[in-house]
């Protein structure tokens, strides 16, 4: 019986090592491929996020630019802001004075509708 088991060990040992080597190389290849895929996926996601953030920021800046242009073109709004600048009151003036708030917001809405048309 001992001779038969030695024969089986000699017969299967090289195949076992070859199979173990092939499986190890395959697993390492799979591991490094998955790591590379994950890195690429993270990079692409970060790039898309940066592009969307840049687009949103650009849109926000464009809206602020349009608002600044509207304010500069309307002397009644400019005069109100000059008066508020000299007031030195830290409170929100437009919360207290509702009529001026409505007047300025309606002026801005009118000019924004004319600008888009």
Image (cartoon, grey):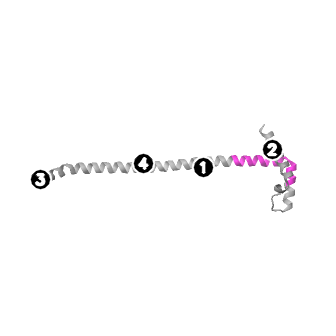
Above or below, 117 against 32 in this view is: above
Between residue 14 and residue 103, name the one nearer to us. 103
Measured in 3D between alpha carbons, the distance from the residue under mark 1 to the one under mark 2, in whole angstroms, is: 32 Å
Measured in 3D between alpha carbons, the distance from the residue under mark 3 to the one under mark 4, in whole angstroms, is: 47 Å
Q: Are marks 3 and 4 in contact (CB under 8 Å)?
A: no
Above or below, 43 against 116 in this view is: below
The residue carrying mark 4 is 33
Residue 22: give x, y in percent of width and height. 31, 48
Q: Secondary structure at mark 3?
A: loop
The residue depicted at 12 percent of the width and 54 percent of the height is 2
- Left or right: residue 28 versus residue 7 is right
Nearer the observer: mark 3 or 4; the answer is 3
Magenta span of residues: 59-80
Q: Report the disc number at residue 50.
A: 1
Q: Are marks 1 and 2 in contact (CB under 8 Å)?
A: no
Nearer the observer: mark 1 or 2; the answer is 2
- Whether the magenta-drawn stretch holds residue 69 is answered as yes
The residue carrying mark 2 is 109
Residue 78: give x, y in percent of width and height. 85, 52
Q: Secondary structure at mark 1?
A: helix
Decide: few, some or many residues near mark 3? Use Cα within 10 Å; few <14, some 14-19, many ≥20: few
Q: Secondary structure at mark 4?
A: helix
Residue 94: give x, y in percent of width and height. 82, 55
The tag earlier along the polypeptide, 3 or 1, is 3
- Whether the magenta-drawn stretch holds residue 48 is answered as no
């Amino acid at each position: 019986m001992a001779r038969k088991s030695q024969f089986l060990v000699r017969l299967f040992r090289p195949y076992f090592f070859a199979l173990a080597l092939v499986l190890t190389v395959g697993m390492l290849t799979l591991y490094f491929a998955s790591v590379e895929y994950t890195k690429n996926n993270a990079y692409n996601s970060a790039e898309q996020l940066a592009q969307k953030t840049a687009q949103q920021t650009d849109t926000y800046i464009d809206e602020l630019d349009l608002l600044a242009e509207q304010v500069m073109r309307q002397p009644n709004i400019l005069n109100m802001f000059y008066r508020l600048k000299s007031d030195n009151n830290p409170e929100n003036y437009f919360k207290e004075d509702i009529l001026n708030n409505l007047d300025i917001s309606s002026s801005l809405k009118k000019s924004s509708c004319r600008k888009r048309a």
